[in-house]
Image (spheres, grey):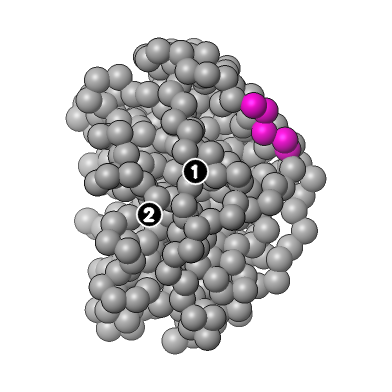
Amino acid sequence: MGPQRPAHKNSDAGNGHTGIRPAGQEMAAALEDGAPGPARPTVAPKRKPRPKHQATKVLPKSQQAILPRKRHIPVWAWAVGGIIALALVAAAAFGIIQTSRSALMAVVKPTPTSSPVSPIARSLTACPLFVSNRDGKREIYYLTEQGELVRITHTPSDSESWSPVPMPDGAIIFTSNRDNKREIYHLAETGDVTRITNTPGNGESWEPAPMLDGSILFTSDRDGKREIYHLSAEGEIVQITNTASDGESWGPSSTPDGDILFTSDRDGKREVHHLAAEGEVVQITNTPGDGESWGPSSTPNGDILFTSDRNGKREIYHLTGTGNVTRITNTPGNSESWDPVLTPDGVIFLTSNRGGKREVYHLTAEGEIVQITNTPGNSESWSPTQ
């Protein structure tokens, strides 16, 4: 069952101030510029063995929590591995650059809130959730296949909502400061909003990411710096990173087999790291020079999409299980691309400012970059998720 999505038009959605055109006008294609790169071999739609990463700093297992038992992966997920391979091969023909190199490697009870939101109904489409300030502040929106815009949060007063992520059951978790600091909230299909973190003191919690068993990973500074935590279905919170020295860890996401990807600057700059269920932490990017890598997102066959400025500006890269890194966007001029996410049907959504401001785009299996939001005025749209 795919993520649930709003099925009806909200009172805010689709009117003149949203700036959303009919689907045919909204989805104006913009092809990537750049010289053709070599075609990539097809990625088999199955789980590949992990690369043998070079040694890097590993936290003691005694400092790592035992994560939830690995779950069975749905059959549909493996098929997507082949689709992303087609997108990468086609992208090469449209000017995508190949850069191969070996990659080194308080228990909380839910708190109800009365914020009005748009009810959510079932949908199996691949259109994304995203964040936009088109109505004056950050709120969460949904774009239907017909190009209709639906606003699904209505955060009270001057507070905002952002970082939406769908749960396996179709609900949405997101970050909001509606209670005067960043906390994580749960939006049910009925439209009810529940606060699910209650960070002590001046600490905050943000960047939620669901796991396959319905538990939640998130970032929090409750102990003085950014670390990654796990919230179980029973409401128990466990710190699962304990970054040494002055480093921090943040931006978690889960892999198909229940491991965790995250960003950390524990070795002096941002790199992508992998945390296995057994507690071993491995650095899986080793960005050359002053470049950095961050924002990992796993594909169904275990490959990784991430953002890096290794070539002077933010672009999106693909890391295979064998350690090969491929650049899959080549944004023209001084513009950039970041925030990649892969949908169940193999479409890569991303944020880019190639048109002068942040908008949401997708990279098709044919290698075409298509703009799917057209935010009015000086407003912007960003951070797609599916």
Which of the 4 quarters of the picture holds residue 169?
bottom right
Quadrant of the image containing the C terminus: top right
Q: Position of residue 36 (x, y in %)?
A: 46, 13
Residue at position x 45%, y 21% in the image: 96
Label 1 residue SS:
strand
Res 228 → quadrant: bottom left
Which residue: 57% across, 31% down? 347
The answer to whether residue 84 is above or below residue 217 is above
Tell me, yes or no, whether the highlighted magenta stretch contains residue 44: yes
Percent from the top left, x then y, of residue 382?
35, 38
Amino acid type of the residue tagged 1 in the rendering:
Ser
Looking at the picture, tell me which residue is in the foreground, 101 or 163: 101
Tag 2's secondary structure?
strand
Badge 1: few (under 14), some or many (20 or more) residues near its Cα, within 10 Å?
some
| Amino acid on which disc 2 is placed | Glu
Residue range of the region highlighted in magenta in the rendering: 41-45
Q: Which mark is residue 102?
A: 1
Residue plotted at (53% across, 39% down): 324
From the image, tell me which residue sits under label 2: 271
Q: Earlier in the sequence, mark 1 or mark 2?
A: 1
Can residue 108 be seen in the rendering of this structure? yes
